[in-house]
Amino acid sequence: EMNERESARYYKLAADKGHTRAMEQYAQLLFSGEGVEINWKESSRLFKLIADQGDSEAKFKFAGRLYRGDKISRDKREAAEYYKLAADQEHVKSILKYASMNFNGDGIEVNKEIASQYYKLAADQGDVISMFKYATMNYFGDGIEENKQEAARYYKLAADQGQVDSLYNYGVMSDKGEGVMMDKKTALYYYKL
């Protein structure tokens, strides 16, 4: 316990001098009570301060606390704002959460057009689930204009990374010639994977 208290003291000293990572560590210690007395209010203030300084991971973590009401007042609308700020810095987990909140109307108005833009952003960064979701939105025209070619392209990208639903969907599209040339051989290949 002496080491925990001493570590907390040094984190606080560095945090008081504005060292971002030390502020984050100290905020976490205040939240958990390791080496210091639990102080959720101060922990939240520090997390918000770090987030407001521009750190995308801090924005994501603070947004999560707001979203869950994790020892602070639950505020999904403000959480969405922080997820968006981090998403606009290309923080993939924030992109996914912001897209999902827009898609489902989770704490904010349903906006599938924005959801599709953010799913595409994450998909283009290699996120397989986003590839599938973006493809599905395009396939069905769910909140956006139907685009079978775009759906096929993203189902294939996800399928080639082993995403099970995309394997099947791309196989069906190849079998029927939806968005891609009809190709029974390709369809069979993706059905078997």
Image (tube, helix red, strand yellow):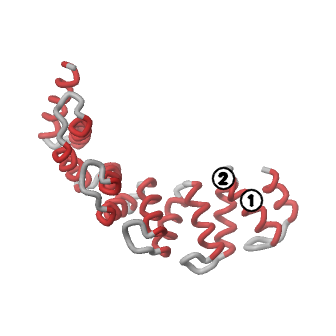
Left or right placement of residue 186 versus residue 92 in this view: right
Residue identified by numbered label 2 = 163
Give me the residue at 27% from left, 55% from top: 54
Which of the two labelled residues, at mark 1 and mark 2, occupies the earlier sequence position? 2
Give me the residue at 36% from left, 60% from top: 83
Quick one: label 2, few (<14), some, or many (20+) residues within 10 Å?
A: some
Placement of 104 over or under 71, stated as above or below: below
Placement of 86 over or under 8, stated as above or below: below
Q: How many marks?
A: 2
SS assignment at label 2: loop
Q: Which mark is residue 99?
A: none
Quick one: label 1, few (<14), some, or many (20+) residues within 10 Å?
A: many
The amino acid at mark 2 is: Gln
Q: Which mark is residue 168?
A: 1
Q: In the image as oriented, which residue stretches furthest toward the top?
A: 2
Placement of 107 over or under 4, stated as above or below: below
Q: Position of residue 16 (x, y in %)?
A: 12, 40
Disc 1/disc 2 C-alpha distance (Å): 9 Å
Image quadrant of residue 35? top left
Give me the residue at 15% from left, 35% from top: 12
The amino acid at mark 1 is: Tyr
Image quadrant of residue 178? bottom right
Give me the residue at 82% from left, 60% from top: 186
Left or right placement of residue 14 versus residue 178 in this view: left
Q: Position of residue 144 (x, y in %)?
A: 55, 78
Q: Position of residue 60 (x, y in %)?
A: 35, 53
Q: Position of residue 21 (x, y in %)?
A: 26, 40
SS assignment at label 1: helix
